[in-house]
């Protein structure tokens, strides 16, 4: 996936997410690949990820970045 990410997905993510603003809900956040592409126009980011292992990785990534406007939710059924 790394080669595909570099080849086209990075630019696609950047183009798509730089337009986002306000309060944002991202469903199926995985390990948080998209976080770096959100701009300061996003006032709050709610990341929904049902898998506990992915949520753990997501939480570690957010802790390293020290974002204060991000919340993680399990959104389990």
Image (cartoon, grey):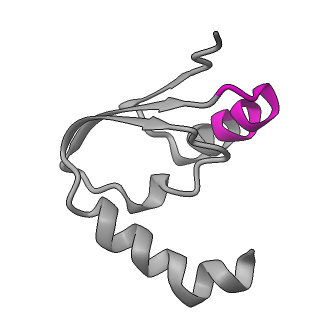
Left or right of 62? Residue 54 is right
Marker count (numbered): 0
Q: Quadrant of residue 54?
A: top right
Position of residue 11 relative to residue 44, above or below, is: below
Where is residue 53 drawn, in percent x and y?
81, 33
The residues colored magenta run 50-59
Residue sitting at 57 percent across and 39 percent down? 28
At x 64%, y 9%, the residue is 77
Residue at 62% in and 19% down: 74
Magenta segment's dominant SS is helix
* Residue lying at the far top of the rendered structure: 77
Q: Looking at the rendering, in which quadrant would you find the N terminus? A: bottom right
44 up-or-down from 66: above or below: above
Magenta stretch holds residue 77: no
- Say above or below: 19 vs 6: above
Q: Residue at x 60, y 37 (%)?
A: 63
Along the viewing direction, whichever of 58 and 15 lies nearer the viewer:
15
Q: Is residue 68 left or right of residue 55?
A: left
Which quadrant would residue 5 be assigned to in this image? bottom right
Q: Residue furthest front?
A: 77
Which residue, as the protein is rendered here, is positioned at the far bottom?
A: 7
Position of residue 42 measured from the top left corner of the image (x, y, whole percent):
24, 43
Residue 41: x %, y % from top left:
18, 49
């Amino acid at each position: 996936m790394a080669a595909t990410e570099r080849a086209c997905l990075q630019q696609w993510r950047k183009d798509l997410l730089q337009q986002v603003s306000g309060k944002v809900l991202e469903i199926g956040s995985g390990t948080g690949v998209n976080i770096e592409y959100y701009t300061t126009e996003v006032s709050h980011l709610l990341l929904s990820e049902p898998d506990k292992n992915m949520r753990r990785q997501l939480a570690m990534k957010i802790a390293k970045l020290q974002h204060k406007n991000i919340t993680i939710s399990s959104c389990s059924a």
